[in-house]
Amino acid sequence: MTVEAVAGSPSGARAASPPYVAIAVISAAALAYEVLLIRLFSIVQWHHFAHMVISLALLGYGASGAFLALSAEVLQRRFVTVFAVNALLFGVTAVTSFLLVQVLPFNPLELLWDPAQPMWLALVYLVLAVPFFFAANCLGLSFYSFSKLIPRAYGYDLIGAGLGSLGVIALLYVLKPGQLLMVIGASGAVAAALLTAGGSVRRRRAVVGAASVSILVLAGLAGRGVSLQPSPYKGLSHALRVGGSELVEEKSSPLGLLSVVRSPLVPYRHAPGLSLNSTIEPPAQLGVFTDAEALSVITRFDGDISRLAYLGDLTSALPYQILNRPRVLVLGAGGGADVLQGIYHGAGEIDAVEVNPQMVALVRDDYGEYAGRLYDRQEVRVFAQEARGFVAGSERGYDLIQVALLDSFGASSAGLYALSESYLYTVEALQEYVSRLRPGGLLAITRWVKLPPRDGLKLFATAAAALRLSGVEDPERRLAWVRGWSTSTVLVSNGEFSPQAVAAVRQFCTERAFDLVYVPGIRPGEANRRNVLAKPLFFLGAQAVLEHAPAEFLDSYKFDIRPATDDRPYYFNFFRWSSLPELLDLRQQGGMALLDSGYLVLVVTLLQAVAASALLILLPVWIRSRRRISSVPAGTKWRVFFYFMAIGLAFLFVEIAFIQRFVLFLSHPVYAVSVVLAGFLIFAGLGSRYAQREGRSGAWRGLLLAAVTGIAGISLIYLLALAPGLDALMSWHDLPKIMVTLMLIAPLAFLMGLPFPLALTALGDRARDLIPWAWAVNGCASVLAAVLATLLAIQLGFTFVVLSAIVLYAFAAWVVGHSFTDREASIG
Amino acid sequence: MFNGLASPRFSKGRRWPRRPALTRRFLSLLLVFALPLPQGARAAEDAWVEQRQEMLAAIRDMAATTPLDTGGEAMSESVMAVMGRVPRHEFVPERMKPLAYLNRPLPIGHGQTISQPYIVALMTDLLDVDAEDVVLEVGTGSGYQAAVLGELVRKVYTVEVIAPLGEQAAGRLARLKYDNIESRVADGYYGWEEHAPFDGIMVTAAAGHVPPPLIRQLKRGGRMLIPVGGRFLTQYLMIVEKDEQGAVTTSQVLPVRFVPLTGEH
C-alpha cells in the first residue's frame, strides 16, 4: 500500500493515505511497552509505583498533542520523514529511558524522609514520557495529515493496540522482560522501515539503513537483554547479600519472575508466626522470590514427618486441632509449606491450588527430589489454577479450605498492595469457600498481624458478613480467631462449633503462647494475655463486629475495614480520609507506617496528572492565541474540550470496570486482562472503521447519538445481569468462557469505537487546527481516567464507575447535540 | 460499647526542627567543612555537639507525645545522655554525614539503614538495661545501636550476617574505642551461645519469627526487643519478656500515640 501512497504526492513526502500498518505496529509496540514497564517496575521496584510512573509517562501522549498543535502544519509537509524519525526515536528511547531510570537514585521508601526524592520521581516521569511522546507523534500527525481518513487510521491504531496487548503476554512466556524490552525497541525501527519501503531510493536507503542498524544493535543486545537491578531494599537483594547464597534458577512468565535462591550458610527457616514456645529448627529450605520479593520456600523433606513439627506451631495449624484426617484444599500452595503442614497433620487428601504453573513445576519437577516428591504423593493433587476459578469450577466438598499467607510482611506492612484488586478475600469469595465445605468443615485464613488491627479485623468482618449474607443467623457461633505476635488465623465453620472444638482452640493457644481473639463464649479476661496490647483492640473489634450494629463500628474505625466485595475488591486498602490529618501529624514518629500509603500515592498521582494535563492542554491554546493564528471561536474550543475529555474518561471507565468483571469470570490475572483488553480495543477498532464508511456527510451526529444510547443501554444491562449470568457459567472450560467474554464485549466495544473518530472527522471538516488539540485532551483524559477509576472503585465500587461513564457519555452527546462548531450550526 | 476507651485525641506535638534550628545547623555545617584543620577540628567537634543537642530536642519532643505503654513515663535520662554522647556522624557513610543528626533513618549501603534516632532511643529505653548487664544484639548494621548500648551496659555482643557490614562496623567500633563491644560476622539465628544467657537482646534484623535459640539465651527476667516493619519505617516494637519461671510473653508498642477507635458511642 505504501508504494502508491508515497508516489501520490509530487515531493514524495506527502502520502495519499496514512501508513496503516506502521500505525498498527507503533500502537502495538506502545501498548506492549506499557505492559512491559509494569512488569519491569514490579521487579526492580514495587508495582504500585509502576502504575503511578506509567500513568504519568502516558502524558507523553498529551505532550505530543500540544507539540503537534503548534507544529503539525509544518511537519505534515515532510510526513514520511517525520513519522519514520519519530518511530525510530520511540524504539531507541523505549530502551534507553528504562536504562536511565534504573540508574536514577529514586527510592520510594525514602519519599517521606529525603527531600530530594520527589525530584528524582519527577525525573523518572519525564524520562519515561519520552518514548510515549514519540509514539504519539506518529499517530497524532497521521490523524492531522489525513483528516478524512481518521476513523480508518484510528481503527488500525486500536486494532494494533489490541494485538499488542495479546502479543506482549505471549512474548513474556518466551522472553525475559529484559529481552522483550529490546524487541519493543526494534519494533520502532520496523515501523520506520515499513513506512519508507516504497519511497524514493535515497530516502529508502537512508531510513532502511538506519532501521537495520538499530535492529541489529538491539537484537545483539537482546541476546542477554537488559539486566535488571532490583532495589537494594527488596527481599531478593537482601538474600543474595548473605554469605554463601546463590541464585540457582530463574523462571519468567507474565505471572512474575521467580528467583530460586540457595543459602546454605544461613538457612531460611521460613516459618512465619512461629510460636515463641517452639524449639524446633525447620529443615533446609530453598527461597523462591516472586518479582524479587514475596518469599516462599521449598522445604527439604526426606519423609521424616517429625522434622516438620514446627508446622504445628504456626497459627495456621489451628484447624488441624479440630479436624481429624480432613480432606484439605490449599489455596495458594506457593512452595508447598501448607501442603507439608497438611501431611504433618495426617490429612486424608490434599488438593493444592497454585496460580503460577512455573511455581508448581519448581516444586514438582526441578526440585522434586529436594521437596521429597511432595506433589507425587498419593494423597496430594496439584492444580495450576487461580483460586476463585478453581473453587467455582469444582464440585468437591472439603473439610478444610486453607487460604495460605503468601504475600510478604514487608510489602504488606508498607501498604504496597493497597491498590491491587484481590478477589481472594471478598464477601462473595468467602461465601463460595464456605459453600464448598462439608458439614462441620472449616475455612481457615491466615494474615499478618498489623498494629493497630487492620487486615485481621477486616477479614473477621468479611467472614461475619459472608455468613449473614448466606442466611446464617448466628455467625457468632461459627467463628473463631486466634493470633500470635506476627500472624493471626480466622476460622469460619460450616456449622456451630462444638464445646470440644472450642476447648481445642483454647488449648492450642495455651500451649503455643497464642492469644484467643474470639471463640464462642469467650470471656473478656481470656483475651490479650500473652501478646499484650495496651488495649485489647483485637478482642474489642471482634466483639463489635459481631454485635447488633457492626456498620456503626466499621464506620467509626480509623481504618477502612469495611468488608471487601467483588464490586470493591480492595481488601488491602485501609486508608480513610478522616484519619489523614492525625497520621500526617505523626508522620515523623511512624505515622506513615499507619497510613497505608498506596491510596495516597494514587491521590498524589491524580493531582500531578491534573496539573500536567492542564499545562499541556492550555499551553498550546495560549501560545496560538497569542500568535493569533487560530480562527476558531472560543465556544468551539470549549465544546471540543468537554467532548473529548468526557469520552476519553468514559471509554476507560467502562473498559477498566468491565475488565475487572471479566477477570473474575476468566479467573486468570494475566490472560484475562489481555483477552479483555484486546477484545475492547479490536472491536472498538472495528467500530471505528465502520464509522469511516457510515459517518460521512451530515449523518455523523445521528450515528453518534445512536452509539451513545447503545453504550448506555448495554452498560446498564450488564450492570444488572452480568454478575449473576457469569456466575452461572463459572464452571465452563476456558475456551468457551473466552468466546462468551468476547461476544459480550463485542457490541459494547464496537459502539465505544465510534464517538472519538466521528467527532474528530467532523472537526477535520470544520476546524482542522483543533485536531491535535483534541488528541492532547483525549490523551490527558486517558491518564486521568486510569487513576480516577481506581480511586472511585476503592471508595464506591466498580458499579459506580460504570454509572459515571454513562453520565459522561450522555454529557458528551449533549455537548454536540445541537452544534459542534458555531459555523456548523448554519451549515447543517 | 467503647466508653472508657481512650478517645481520639490528635496529639499536637511541637514540630521539629524549627526554622532557627535549621539555620543554626546550616551554619554549623559550614563550620565543619569550611574551617581548616587543626584549629578547625575543635570547631568541627563543637558543631557536631551542637547538632547532637538539636537531635536530642527532637527526640524529647516526640517522646513527650508518645505514651510508653510499658512503664516509663518519659524517655530515661541515662538513655538521653548517651544519645547526646555517641558520635552518630561516625556511623554513616561519608556523604551522609551532614544528615547524620537529622531525626530520620539513613541508607548505609548494602540495602541497610541506620535507624531513626528517635526509634533508637525508644528501643534502648524499652530494653531497660542496667550498668552491669550483658546484652546481645542481632544485626549490627552500622554499629550505632551497639555503641549506644555499649555506653549503658557492661558488655555488648553483636552479630552481623552481611560480612562487609559487620567488618566495617567492627573497625569503626574499635577506632572509637568501644572496648566493651565484641562483634562477629555470623548467622544471628544461633545468638552467641558462649556468652549466654543475656540480660537483654536487641534483634534489629527483621524476621518472620523469633529464633528459638535467642529465646533460650535470654535470661529469666530478661527482655528482648524487636522492631517490626520496613527498613525506613517501624510499624511497631515488640517486647519479649521471660519471667522468673521461664514463661515467655510479648507486648507490642506503637512508636506513636494512636488509637484507632473513635469511641464516641
Image (spheres, coloured by chain):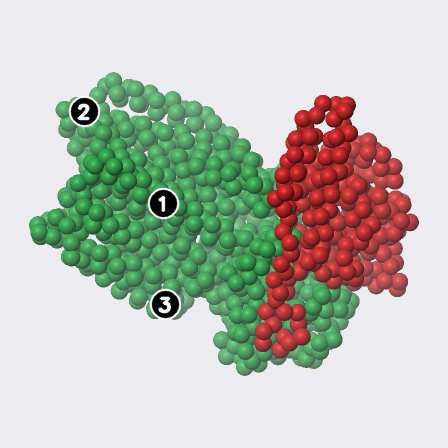
Which chain's colour is red? B
Disc 1 marks a residue whose amino acid type is Ser
Which residue, as the protein is rendered here, is positioned at the far top? Answer: A202
Q: Is residue A730 above or below residue A337?
A: below
Q: Is residue B53 left or right of residue A739?
A: right
Q: Residue at x 66, y 72 (%)?
A: B5
Name the residue beneath numbered marker 1.
Answer: A613
**Residue A458 vertical placement versus A780 (above, below):** below
N-term-proximal mark, 3 vs 2: 2
Amino acid carrying label 2: it is Gly
Nearest the eye: B114 or A370: B114
Residue denoted by label 3: A725
Q: How many marks?
A: 3
Q: Residues within 10 Å of mark 3 (few under 14, many from 20)?
A: few
- The percent position of residue A85, horizontal first and vertical second, equals 32, 27
Report helix, strand or loop for mark 2: loop
Q: Which residue is mark 2?
A: A12
Same chain for the residues at labels 1 and 3, yes or no?
Answer: yes
Question: What's the distance in space between the residues labelled 1 and 3, CA to CA?
Answer: 40 Å
- Determine which quarter of the picture holds residue A73: top left
Q: Nearer the viewer, mark 2 or mark 1?
A: 1
The image shows residue A668 at horizontal and vertical percentages of 46, 54
Foreground residue among B265 and A154: B265
Element class at badge 3:
helix
Task: Give the letter of the green chain.
Answer: A
Q: Residue at x 70, y 25 (%)?
A: B35
